[in-house]
Amino acid sequence: MRLGMIGLGKMGYNLAQNLLTHHHEVVVYDVHSEPGEQLAKEGATAASNLEALITHLDSPRIVWLMVPAGAVVDAVIDELIPLLSEGDIVIDGGNSHYKDSIARGTKLRGHGIQFLDVGTSGGMEGAAEGGCFMIGGSREAFEVIEPILKDMAVEQGYLYAGESGSGHFLKMVHNGIEYGMMQSIAEGFEILEHSPFAFNYEDVARVWSNGSVIRGWLMDLAGSAFAKDPKLEGMRGIMQSSGEGKWTVETAMDLQVSAPVITMSLLMRYRSLQSDTFHGKVVAALRNEFGGHSVIASDSGKE
Amino acid sequence: MRLGMIGLGKMGYNLAQNLLTHHHEVVVYDVHSEPGEQLAKEGATAASNLEALITHLDSPRIVWLMVPAGAVVDAVIDELIPLLSEGDIVIDGGNSHYKDSIARGTKLRGHGIQFLDVGTSGGMEGAAEGGCFMIGGSREAFEVIEPILKDMAVEQGYLYAGESGSGHFLKMVHNGIEYGMMQSIAEGFEILEHSPFAFNYEDVARVWSNGSVIRGWLMDLAGSAFAKDPKLEGMRGIMQSSGEGKWTVETAMDLQVSAPVITMSLLMRYRSLQSDTFHGKVVAALRNEFGGHSVIASDSGKE
Amino acid sequence: MRLGMIGLGKMGYNLAQNLLTHHHEVVVYDVHSEPGEQLAKEGATAASNLEALITHLDSPRIVWLMVPAGAVVDAVIDELIPLLSEGDIVIDGGNSHYKDSIARGTKLRGHGIQFLDVGTSGGMEGAAEGGCFMIGGSREAFEVIEPILKDMAVEQGYLYAGESGSGHFLKMVHNGIEYGMMQSIAEGFEILEHSPFAFNYEDVARVWSNGSVIRGWLMDLAGSAFAKDPKLEGMRGIMQSSGEGKWTVETAMDLQVSAPVITMSLLMRYRSLQSDTFHGKVVAALRNEFGGHSVIASDSGKE
Amino acid sequence: MRLGMIGLGKMGYNLAQNLLTHHHEVVVYDVHSEPGEQLAKEGATAASNLEALITHLDSPRIVWLMVPAGAVVDAVIDELIPLLSEGDIVIDGGNSHYKDSIARGTKLRGHGIQFLDVGTSGGMEGAAEGGCFMIGGSREAFEVIEPILKDMAVEQGYLYAGESGSGHFLKMVHNGIEYGMMQSIAEGFEILEHSPFAFNYEDVARVWSNGSVIRGWLMDLAGSAFAKDPKLEGMRGIMQSSGEGKWTVETAMDLQVSAPVITMSLLMRYRSLQSDTFHGKVVAALRNEFGGHSVIASDSGKE
């Protein structure tokens, strides 16, 4: 099939390659010209702007957005609307908030344009070699693009989940689970690190990856990481987060659902951003006040 | 090889079958005679007591215990000691506390007997068809039994972890991680259940099992469970625990390590044992006291 | 001083009485006429609508809102704006979100009207007999109303906290702390309830209220509650929440601050709304899948 | 009354002074001679060893231990047993584990000696000027020493809680609650510290101490601490713990009770002991593996 791919960052670039490998015709565009030029060498048609990209597509046009969530998605959609015709299909494959996807679906339907919100998982490797896709929105549009999904996904790796927003909702919750699983694995290794034993973590990750109850891709990746740096001495334990975990926690609270483990995973990420805390100082100060417990003096320049 | 298997419950029985399949000579014993008789039909030699079991083995004798952790392990070991000779090997494949395993290793070494603490993972299916084994204790003894482990485990599914106790320590932490991963997955489905969408959980588990970051055996099992009961309406949400999760949390605290997600997974299991809580009543009563917020009257017979 | 009090619910009514006791002239209004009529007997002037209320005030007019947070506050403010003049003072004493208070401050300033956001604590008793007030907004306006605050508050029980929003921000965080303190106390009694001892909780609350590190008003209230119902058998452990705790958690996450205890207090409130959970079913089902652990069948009609 | 006080550390010294102020006859002993010499100037009789201390007491002798929990208590009791007679009373006023107190009660009863386990709260100030005492053990012995307790405690500040162990059980849970309350207060100030406002924390603690729902001694102490160091810049946020919080969490788990907030308070103390974490590195490494998210390089010498 022929489709347009807008946004050629880590994920978009890999998806475009994946599609080319499967002999689809891919028209690509990014604000930076280099990735498009690179993909052109692999068979893609590089467009220099959105208007050019659209002219290379046939009705119903299929446009896959892989741009940063938030304002950029809205800006691209607003620019696309006058260029598209009734029946065309816009796909947002990024990590958009499901409420935004519901709103965008409504807006595009008002212009006769079909919209699919597609949560994409599997990391860069998955994007390149076979990922996992959760699709919400028009079932009719889904059926049109299903051959593309079939090629980009691993076997059984895509699901039409339901109405607009359901694809990104599933992806959001997937990421919440991911936070919890990663923190679980990480806490396990933390306990090993403080244990009286001298474990080889690459070996441990390998044995846990083979035959155990906790085997899975994250454990495989732990093995890869320890293979490169056996004690992870080259990095600091600062855990960034890109938003979906926070959305999961906020959504759970809006639904009055208790998700303590996913929530605590997020809070530990925030905690890791601080080398010292104010709440710690307050507790230390209170212990000193009532019990005369000594405090540890701050050491200017250390924190 | 020839070895004795003591304890033919769910795990021991399956391991014995696994060994027979791989053409090992297995002498079996259990306090109940039926499983031994059954295994005899598949080629095992059924012994009617420990003494008889030992007489069927050659030096160095290899005895694998798969009996309930705690006092039973000690009782069996005490009964075995006078029956065994220097150089014989006792293996505890159950879920023993690693500190008990260290003590048992020391005790048996005092009698010239080698001891291995082996954590076994992979569930009943793994025991039968290929599991995961974490081994602590004498390296020399490990090398003797390695051919057995190679056959019982999936490929790369066993690890000599180090000195006495390290095998059960690894298994304990493995189970702590398992608690956290299971709770993470479960919270994700809880959020889906309260969402505005109507997801098919079997489909969701399937797509998350294929190509996603959170793919793994636990997600596969979630798919199996939902295939049998799409909304799990046939069961209550009571989460039992068998001890290793609690040991992980206690060990982390002894090591002054913070493992909030594993800990919270355990606490949610305890919380699930109560349909109502006293702490909830106290908070409701306090809100009533200061703010006049109404309380919900208890309804005798409902809880 | 003379001021108008709009909203005569539990808190507004008690504050009006408090002011009358201190010989202030209070013009009152509520959508229901009864509380105003009642207060008129105690010396208040009851107005039948906002316009009437305003005509009873002198410049600079002081109007205290004690109405439900959210849309009602905006509606009342919109109705007041055309009735007020430059230099008049509007006070929101309810539990508004601090961001709304910032926006309302800006809006009212645009009309030359001064705005104060006042967080009020101390419960109904505090409103009636001396409470705690946290004030944000124009310092000039604060100085005008300070005599009123001095009379309504206990000694040292009011604070000008800073610019618009800071009063409600302080109150929000106060409530977050309150959630954590209440849950802490409640968990303590839960442990006592499951202990091998037979404690009298009223006695325990009393001794902890006198001389201990954890003495304070919440412990006093626990004593009052146990005096009425020694085991709280008359109520269910369902912990409602009215919003400020959730705002505190959301605000902490927006600030990328880890507040695990306040957060967990909120999540336990949500957990208490469910007598059984879907996540519990998922974990029970997974344990059954890999380990053959039995599940507890649901009992239709019970949950 | 006349009694012996063994152990003259921060708490024992202050209690002895408190007793002297109330005109009791106090025989004191400590392994270091200085505090006894000092108290002798205030009217105490300083003994140079346990035997001497006992000879200064009349039947039934009352001996109050204020020594470090654990082995020291046992050592002192073992040394006392041959020196004491039937009907004498031994009081352990330290922070002993309630299970040890149950065992000590049984042991001493076997020698005809009465035992009381007394949890002491109120900090050093409470010990000196009026504290809070939770008493378990023989009711008869309690009635003998009640006049002493009445004088040492604030009004209503002592409670006979029941059989052996119940005094220290109550104290243990009191400390668990204290952990939760301190962490709650501390998290509140942490949120203020990261807020867009510039609060004066001494002022905030003062207003929250007067008339608010969260008023209490800990908030008073927060005010004192901020009065000395407005931003607590002189100290690090390292939160030590002395054991009772951990015992509370362990006891809750043994009782299969979920106490998430008290537990999380303890875990945050452990977390504060680390400036960087291994689990953080694992999560950072995993994010790098699947998503190519950059890690922050460790900076040797910084951690």
Image (cartoon, coloured by chain):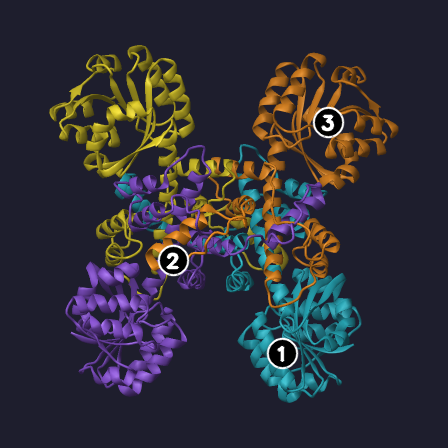
Chain colours: A cyan, B orange, C purple, D yellow
What amino acid is found at the position of numbered circle 3 in the picture? Gly
x%, y% of residue D208? Answer: 27, 56
Please give the chain letter of the residue carrying mark 2. C
Residue A178's place in the image compared with B145, above or below, is below
Task: Tell me the tag on residue A105.
Answer: 1
Residue at the image position 24 percent from the left and 17 percent from the top? D61
Residue C230's place in the image compared with A155, above or below, is above
Residue marked by disc 3 = B7
What amino acid is found at the position of numbered circle 1 in the picture? Gly
Q: Which circle, 2 or 1, is nearer the viewer?
A: 2
Q: Is residue C171 left or right of residue C300?
A: left
Name the residue nearer the viewer: A33 or C152: C152
Q: Is residue A35 left or right of residue C146?
A: right
The answer to whether marks 2 and 1 sit on the same chain is: no
Residue marked by disc 2 = C176
x%, y% of residue C129? Answer: 22, 60
Q: CA distance from mark 1 to mark 3?
A: 61 Å
- The answer to which quarter of the image holds residue C90 is bottom left
Residue D32's place in the image compared with C73, above or below, is above
